[in-house]
Amino acid sequence: YFKKDTVPEAYPIFLVEALIDYESGNYATLQKLNLNDLPQVRGAGDNDRESILQLGHYYKGISYLETGNTEKAIAHFDWVLKNKPDKALQVKATWFLALAYLKENNREKAAALCRSIINKKGNSILIRNAEKILDTLGK
């Protein structure tokens, strides 16, 4: 069920290099990106900072899943979900978090997250995949 997410058409300039590398399969730039110490940019408002943090943590989570570090992936997806992203990003982060828990063999948490995706009635592809996982888990 894992397929890395595509990069949005528009994203903050701070993430350009890391997301270009991400698209080409080079995850090191993104994984080294320090989201705790963002530079102050003239004219950048709270929305830019929030967008950098949400997208940065989200794509870092995917990159860690891609490279087999599920513990770090879980931490980044948890960060995204705790910081109330828009509905589309919330559902996608929930999906990848469920996949990370599956890789960790934590079937209960994965099942709970799949049920959450189904209840939000957003992304029909993710809903179908979540239903398949629940069927496979017998939940």
Image: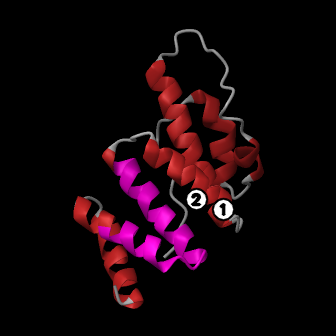
Residue visible at 48% across and 16% down in the picture: 45
Q: At label 1, which amino acid type do we have? A: Glu
Q: Name the residue under label 1.
A: 71
Q: Answer with left or right where residue 120 lies relative to residue 54.
A: left
Is 95 included in the stretch rendered in magenta? yes
State yes or no: discs 2 and 1 in contact (Cβ < 8 Å). yes
Tell me the CA gap for discs 2 and 1: 5 Å
Residue sitting at the far top: 42
Q: Can residue 1 be seen in this view?
A: yes
In this view, the residue in front, 12 or 116, is: 116
State whether residue 112 is above or below residue 44: below
Q: Position of residue 1 (x, y in %)?
A: 48, 76
Characterize the local packing of mark 2: few (<14), some (14-19) or many (20 or more) Cα atoms within 10 angstroms: many
Residue visible at 66% across and 51% down in the picture: 22
Q: Position of residue 49 (x, y in %)?
A: 53, 25
Is 2 included in the stretch rendered in magenta? no
Please, what is the dominant secondary structure of the magenta stretch?
helix
Q: Answer with left or right where residue 122 lies relative to residue 34.
A: left
- Count of all numbered marks drawn on residues in the image: 2
Q: Where is residue 14 in the image (x, y as percent from the top left)?
A: 63, 29
Q: Mark 2 points at which residue?
A: 74
State whether residue 125 is above or below residue 17: below
Magenta segment boundaries in residue numbering: 88-115
